[in-house]
């Protein structure tokens, strides 16, 4: 589990503009480059080519390592800002980002920490959306 707490370092709000990145970024294994070697799957059933700029409650990135399927899933907590959160599935690299800034400008205010929570699951094998959904249900109830 990962909890990120970001505080404004000044007495003035940190203004964050709309952008397709900004949030939790994940870069896949070097073996998943060129980009056609990486697989991505969102909670909404989208792959890398159709999932960019969509929203999800979890996102998978994976590919082959030593000839075997491997991967990881990031589960997004429902208490996070702008949940379900926007996703950036990079079209050129084995990289993804959970990017709340895609939905527009926002700010981190003095005295009001920005807290985001994620659970990262690492596994062997191809992604099983039903099993991942069950893991998300367990995680989301916390």
Image: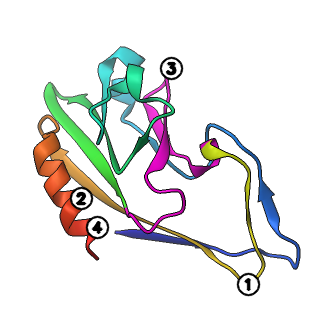
Q: Earlier in the sequence, mark 3 or mark 1?
A: 3
Q: CA distance from mark 3 to mark 2?
A: 28 Å
Rendering coords of residue 39 (x, y %) = 29, 27
Query: Residue sitting at 31 percent across and 19 percent down?
Result: 37
Residue 92: mark in rendering: 3
- In this picture, residue 35 sits left or right of residue 132: right
Compared with 85, 34 (above or below) is above
Q: Residue at x 88, y 73 (%)?
A: 12
Q: Is residue 84 above or below residue 31?
A: below
**Residue corresponding to mark 2:** 136
Residue situated in front as seen by the camera: 101 or 90:
101
To which residue does mark 1 refer? 111
- Closer to the chain start, of discs 3 and 4, is 3
- Place of residue 80 in the rendered image (x, y in percent of width and height, measured from the top left): 48, 64
Compared to residue 72, the image places residue 138 above or below, namely below
Distance from Cα at disc 2 to Cα at disc 4:
6 Å
Residue wearing tag 4? 140
How packed mark 2 is, by other alpha carbons closer than 10 Å (few <14, some 14-19, many 20 or more), is many
C-alpha separation, residue under disc 1 versus residue under disc 2: 30 Å
Displayed quadrant of residue 103: top right
> Helix or strand or loop: what does disc 3 sit on?
loop
């Amino acid at each position: 589990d990962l909890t990120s707490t970001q505080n404004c370092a000044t007495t003035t709000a940190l203004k964050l503009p709309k952008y397709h990145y900004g949030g939790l970024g994940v870069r896949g294994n070097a073996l998943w480059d060129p980009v056609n070697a990486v697989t991505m799957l969102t909670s909404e059933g989208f792959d890398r080519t159709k999932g960019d700029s969509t929203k999800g409650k979890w996102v998978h990135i994976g590919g082959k390592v030593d000839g075997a399927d491997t991967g990881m899933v990031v589960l997004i907590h429902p208490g996070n800002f702008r949940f379900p959160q926007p996703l950036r599935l990079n079209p050129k690299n084995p990289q993804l980002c959970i990017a709340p800034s895609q939905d527009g400008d926002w700010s981190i205010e003095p005295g009001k920490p920005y807290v985001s929570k994620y659970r990262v699951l690492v596994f062997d094998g191809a992604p099983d959306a039903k099993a991942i959904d069950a893991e998300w249900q367990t995680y989301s109830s916390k």
